[in-house]
Amino acid sequence: MKIIYTLLITLSAFTFLSCNKETLNTQTDVMNKLLTNKSWYLDYSITESQTATSPVVFKSYVGQSTYFITYLKNGETKDSDGITGTYTVELINGASQIHMQLKTSNGNPFEVIYNIISVGESNMVLSKLVSGPATKLYFTTK
């Protein structure tokens, strides 16, 4: 009886883990399909800052429709500032993220990680936390 019980627990755990991995792969596949082979134009960004009494929202339209980033199907990315590199879409602790390994036009490497708030056929919202308050970036395709 113990052997059957142990076998059932093992089989259940294997099935559960297999379903989770498949679900994670499906989610990242869908996000990749929505992201790729499009130029995403930054419409505006919002940075929230907490003061002693209330939150303050800074909305910026600087560079509206002039900054864009393109995520290519082969895992490469490039933007209007001449920054190139590679990216992967991952699910980390339930959060969808874009991990980017980039190089400036001068060849200096750096890494950027964005949380994906939402992504659709023509709209995308990313959140970036460097140091201090988070900034939400609002993109559309043209």
Image: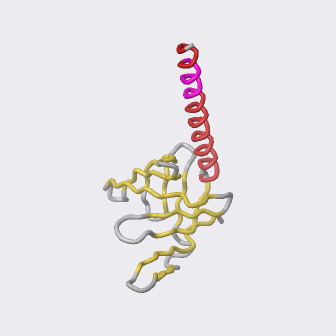
Which residue is found at the position 40% from the left and 71% from the top? Answer: 133
Predominant SS of the magenta segment: helix
Res 140 → quadrant = bottom right
Q: Nearer the viewer, residue 1 or 121?
A: 1
Where in the figure is residue 100, as x and y percent of width and height? 43, 52
| Residue 12 magenta-highlighted | yes
* Residue sitting nearer the eye, 15 or 121: 15
Q: Quadrant of residue 53?
A: bottom left
Looking at this view, name the residue that lies furthest to the right.
121
- The residue shown at (61%, 34%) is 19
Quadrant assignment for the N terminus = top right
Give how far across and how far down residue 32 sits, in percent: 59, 48
Which residue is nearer to you in this view: 110 or 131?
131
> Taking 100 as reference, is 16 left or right?
right
Which quadrant is home to the C terminus? bottom right
Total number of numbered discs in the rendering: 0
Q: Residue at x 61, y 43 (%)?
A: 29
Give the magenta range: 7-14
**Is 51 colored magenta in this rendering?**
no
71 in relation to 61, above or below:
above
Q: Position of residue 2 (x, y in %)?
A: 53, 15
